[in-house]
Image (tube, rainbow, N blue to C red):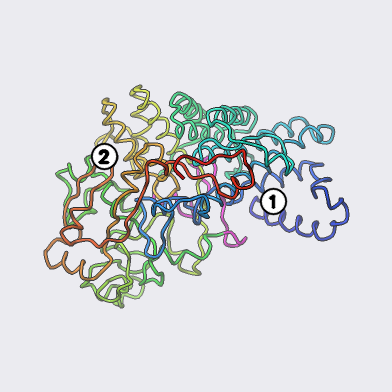
Amino acid sequence: MNLKTFIITIVTIIFFQGCVNLDLDPPSEASSGNWYRNETQFEMSLLELYRRTYWYVGSYYYGDDLATDDFSSRTYSYAQSAGTLSGTTSTVTDLWTRMYTGVAYSNEILSKIEPASSLISQVKLIQFEAEARFLRACMYSTLISYFGDVVFYTEPLTIEETYTLGRTDKATILQAIYADFDFAGENLPESYSNNEYSRATKGAALAMKARIALYQGDWQTARDAAKACMNLGTYSLHPNYRDLFLPASDNTDEVIIKRILSVELGSSWDDNTPYFVTRTPGGNAVFGMSWDLFCSYLCTDGLPIDESPLFDPKNPFKNRDPRLAMNTVEFGTEWLGYIYQPHPDSLKVLNVKTGKYVTNNDSKGVTQHSVYSGLIWKKWIDETWTDDWKADPDMFIMRYADVLLMYAEAKIELNEIDQSVFDAMNMVRARAYGVDKSQITEYPEIKITDQNRMRTIVRMERRMELCFEGRRYMDLIRWRVAEIALNYAKYGWYTSTVMRKIVDDGLWPLPEIPQIDENGIPDLTPIYEKGYYSLLSDWKFDASKNYLFPIPSSEILINGNLTQNPNY
């Protein structure tokens, strides 16, 4: 039975068992008293921990990216970027609750391993233990990344016991996380016979260990874990970057672990698909790429737009890294059956399928509520989104390109810049150009040995490669540059007046080339000050406290042993 069907079956079984067996256990005891008696019951319990609840932070499936400088949103504001994080913010309390629910669930499963030793083979029990420890390590990795020192426990607790625990130093928790990932890596299979990509494997354990080590600045561990994952020989880059994110590429050797979605089985991108689609095909274009991210993409000579002689602000898609036009829609090109053109004078656009011109609802010459920034997301999206306004591209928890870039970054931070670093980064970059890394005349090869310049390059590479995959926020946090990227005014094309000024002054579409700093962050303020951008939002990030989330106020109120993070 394939996993999607299996999950639906599990939910149904649990529901109906709960209805007919309520009188089998005393009300004062857990209803799982007679559970964990066979392999199927363990597997059903473990599969529960792969639900969306435990894997993505913030809204929908793309994590905190909405609250970063990669995203433009017409109607949404986020506490992380608005400077309003507090111990009662729903983002904070939801994250804490979700992760500790996952921890408790993992601990419960682990506590049932020994009692089941006479019922289930030792081989299967070890695998179940490895999977549960992998999942627990993932939950604790998220907790220490966002909150720092947190409550740490590895056994089921009574309610009374939960009120007595204080915070454990995150360095201690990190070592326990490593131990869990190591056990998982030693005892999980490299792959499953049914090509299952949504469950933990040896490679997933190594890759997730590398990620948390990278987040915590443990460069040696990040390097070694990423290299061990690479050495498995199990993974490779999908040949086409654009296609990687579409449903047709569901099964690819680039994916290490992912969440599987299925419209057919009731698991999709909720009801928000129109938010990403332009108005002419029927969407409402609430979400788009920011001009900050747009300007951060390198040119085809490997240089940023403020250094490259190839960049033309009047034709800003030309001579750019190919991932730009794969992640946002180029002006004047076909998109979802229509030519996409946000120019204020383009009142009609071509319906490619019918050959007729129709009203261009993506132009502010037609409607004020056209695309907020002028830049619309393309990554993950195709015409299957608009046939019924439901979408189910699988969401990647970890893919091989991320592992390659983590390995390179760790080696750069250790100042161990060698051929293996160049190979890892060039594999990722060359794939974007549709060539092999050996074809050095077909893409801007990376071969610089200066540590500071390589640090800049790998940060830009992560931003171009991993945008809209839930990585940007934590990258900004761990690089300690969130006070730059998330503490400024955000600009775009909000009014027709601003767009008219750009056109009338002959400066369409990018009025001026912004300066790009060493972290790939552009300064768009001079363009705004000349009247060529609207102020979309004014972001605040307090470096004295916002690098960590606050501990939920409700937890501190009920547990006197918990303390709050500084300055909240």
Q: Which element is circle 1 on?
A: loop
Residue at image coords 58%, 58%:
262
Residue 172 lies within the magenta run:
no
| Disc 1 crowd, CA 10 A, few/some/many (<14, 14-19, 20+) | few
Q: Position of residue 449 (x, y in %)?
A: 27, 25
Instruction: Please tell me whether residue 556 is drawn above or below residue 384 in the rendered image.
Output: above
Instruction: Please tell me whether residue 440 is drawn above or below residue 515 in the rendered image.
Output: above
Which amino acid, mark 2? Glu
Q: Which element is circle 2 on?
A: loop
Residue at image coords 50%, 56%:
60
Quadrant of residue 40 in the image?
top right
Q: Position of residue 267 (x, y in %)?
A: 58, 59
Which of marks 1 and 2 precedes in the sequence? 1
The one nearer the camera, 357 or 266, is 266
Residue at image coords 30%, 56%:
490
Which residue was labeled with disc 2? 442
| Disc 2 crowd, CA 10 A, few/some/many (<14, 14-19, 20+) | some
Which residues, given as a range, are shown in magenta?
A: 241-267
Is 319 left or right of 484, judged from the image as shown? left
Kindly check if marks 2 and 1 are in contact, taking CB atoms under 8 A apart as contact: no
Q: CA distance from mark 2 to mark 1?
A: 45 Å
